[in-house]
Image: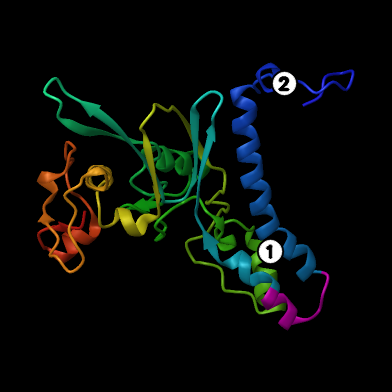
Amino acid sequence: MHDSDGTVLPEHMIPEPPIHDIDRTIKDTFMRLDRDIISEPLRRVFATSSRETAVRLLGPAYAGSCALLGFYDARTRLLRIALTGDSRAVLGRRTTDANGQVSYMVHVLSEEQNGHNESEVARLAAEHPDETGLAKDGRVMGWGMCRAFGDAQMKWPLDVQARLKAEYLGRTPYKNVLTPPYFTAEPVITTTAIQPGDFLILATDGLWESLTSSEAVGLVGTWLANSKSSDKPKPGQEQSVYGPQELPVTLAKDDTVRHRQWNATKRFTGG
């Protein structure tokens, strides 16, 4: 960074930007990317008479994706997590009791944006006051999340969708989409002070459908302990098998979807 006279400032003299400026920049970047995905194709489609070209251009807008960003500032030791969708960020923090016993605290740094999220349900109710039943059984209008990039059928005005259908082989609008937009790509941001030894797990819903946050942290903690141990299994040697109760964490209720479906006892292996 340069001073007003062109002098290069040393790092310790560079002012830290206000927290709200950092958060706003992250949000603006997410939203700008989503506009590029869902709005730019419309401009190009409506400028052509080619249905083949329209189908190709609209493909990315019809598709959808979640995003989970971790932004760490080494100067302030602050970690920002920005979430759009149903991924999750979990932080593990090592603790040692008076007896020297090591365990890990579990800090969930994000909340999935779905029908179980009371803030999201309230947002949808405020934006669509004349519609009921938008969230049911943890889903929003049948979807597993309510914030995403793309998924333009949940965002485009109905007259735009009708024109795409009539003139450009666009998809049929969903019957329950009455007053779009319902989805947004704007992320929810949290900020956490990081301590030495902390570790971060960033994962999509595929992992969290099978493991609880505490199990994931416990498994990483177990791996860290075993990686430093001299008593490691040799090639071809059978590895230890253990259950959730043996992990170095306080376990939370196991409400994972896959565990309920499989109806099987969880066992872990490795080291």
Foreground residue, 159 or 80? Answer: 80
In-image side of 179 versus 243 (left or right): right
In-image side of 22 versus 95 (left or right): right
Residue at position x 50%, y 54% from top?
66
Q: Nearer the viewer, mark 1 or mark 2?
A: 2
Residue 256 counted in the magenta span: no
Residue at position x 63%, y 21% from top?
18
Screen quadrant of the N terminus: top right
**How far across and down, in percent of the image, does residue 51 sit?**
73, 81
Numbered disc 1: secondary structure: helix
Residue 52 counted in the magenta span: yes
Magenta part, dominant SS: helix
Colour pattern: rainbow
Q: Identify the image quadrant of residue 142.
A: bottom left
- Which residues, given as a range, are shown in magenta? 47-56
Residue at position x 66%, y 70% from top?
58
In-image side of 61 versus 3 (left or right): left
Question: In the drawing, what numbered circle is on residue 217?
Answer: none
The mark nearer the N terminus, 1 or 2, is 2
In-image side of 35 versus 89 (left or right): right
Q: Identify the image quadrant of residue 238.
A: bottom left
Q: Is there a contact, CB below 8 Å, between mark 1 and mark 2?
A: no
Q: In this rendering, is residue 48 above or below 182? A: below
Q: Amino acid at mark 1?
A: Val
**How far across and down, in percent of the image, does residue 116 sit?**
33, 46
Question: In the drawing, what numbered circle is on residue 160?
Answer: 1
Question: In the drawing, what numbered circle is on residue 10?
Answer: 2
**How far across and down, in percent of the image, does residue 7 sit?**
84, 20
Q: Amino acid at mark 2?
A: Pro
Whole-number angstrom distance, CA of label 1 to CA of label 2? 52 Å
Numbered disc 2: secondary structure: loop
